[in-house]
Amino acid sequence: MTTGHHSPNSRPLRWALALYPASYGAGARAEVAEHAERHLARVGRLAGLREVADVAGHGARVRFGLTSHRPLGRALATAAPLAAVLAATHALVLGNQAVRLAADPLSDPGVHWTGPIVAMALLVAAPVLMAAAALLGRWAAARILAAATVLTTVLVHVLGRPDLLGTSVSPEAAFALHRSSLALIALNAVLLLAAPPDRTHPRSIAPWLVAGSVVAATALMILTAPLGPENSLTGFDLLAPVATGVAIACTARTAGRAAMATAFLSAPLLLAFLLIPGAFQTPLLQRVTVLYAVGFVTAFGVVRLTDRLSRRSGLSRP
């Protein structure tokens, strides 16, 4: 295998190739390296970095069994568009709350809203565009926007002023944005980044249903209820777990894939709960679990009943 003689990106390419496990085979790795080097020799630095990132991502997916022909990879591909929709809807809810706080005549007149509004706009734009690209099947664009989402949330966390970032203990001192919310948006985007780009299952309408139902419920709650601590629940909080459970039941037709996809989608919430002290309360996790289970069990029962009735109808025909 010849790596590192045709472009200045050769060392990162060698590091990327090192992510492949030994079981992948030296011949297969050499073929990947040869293809990547030919591509690197023809493109510029930015496209070369993207090629190296693609090689590294594929190597990592092969190492951890997340390729599209493995059960974990297929389950992650099932969860990825739903995670993108959840990240985007959560960002939209936060953006709406931020704008309403800025427009509230009772808000603190000493707070300068221009910087936080710009930061919130950037924070909302990336996940919304990511979800749109995923729903439209534009996976190359969705992956770039997922990386931009992660980068944006990290920058907002690092550079955010006290009037932008707050804690769950004193939300009234914050610009409607908590570090736990940043973590949820970023971790859901990471799920899409880790998913295999060559999905093996057909495109499903389930993510569109999740997006439409969650956004509609959130808009209804926003238009009909006042903003304040007593109205902390939104349509996103109540309907997102149910809609996601329904989507998994309709998309993952086997119990094993449904269980793995559920585990992937629950990872952001559980990681945020474990990594950020005080981010969530245990009753919140219990409510999400119950709502998700209700949506999944109901839809799974309907799917199984429909399949059984369709088989009986097919057998009864002459």
Image (cartoon, rainbow, N blue to C red):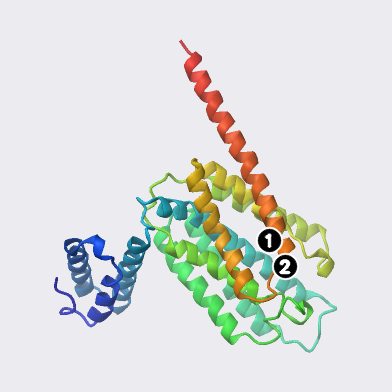
> In the image, 259: left or right of 177?
left
- Whole-percent x, y for residue 129 in the image: 52, 64
Q: Visible in this render: residue 219?
A: yes
Q: How many marks?
A: 2
The residue that mark 2 highlights is 281
Rendering coords of residue 90 (x, y %): 64, 64
**In-front residue for pair 140/77:** 77
- Position of residue 202 relative to residue 285, above or below, is above
Give the CA distance from mark 1 to mark 2. Answer: 7 Å
Q: Position of residue 110 (x, y in %)?
A: 78, 89
Please state, as top left, top right, bottom left or bottom right, where the N terminus lies in the image.
Answer: bottom left
The residue depicted at 32 percent of the width and 75 percent of the height is: 49
Q: Quadrant of residue 295?
A: top right
Q: Position of residue 99 (x, y in %)?
A: 72, 73
* Foreground of the two, 280 or 34: 280
Secondary structure under tag 2 reads loop
Write the residue at 42% across / 54% down: 72
Identify the residue at horizontal 51%, vertical 52% (top origin).
261
Q: Residue furthest bottom?
A: 110
Residue 124 in view of the camera:
no
Give the residue type at disc 1: Leu
- Is residue 103 toward the left or the right of residue 131 in the image? right
Report whether 60 appears left or right of 11.
Answer: right
The disc at residue 285 is 1
Quadrant of the rendered image containing residue 266: bottom right
In the displayed structure, 256 sits above or below 107; it is above
- Label 2 near label 1: C-beta < 8 Å? yes
- Label drawn at residue 311: none
Which quarter of the image is occupied by the C terminus? Answer: top left
Secondary structure of residue under mark 1: helix
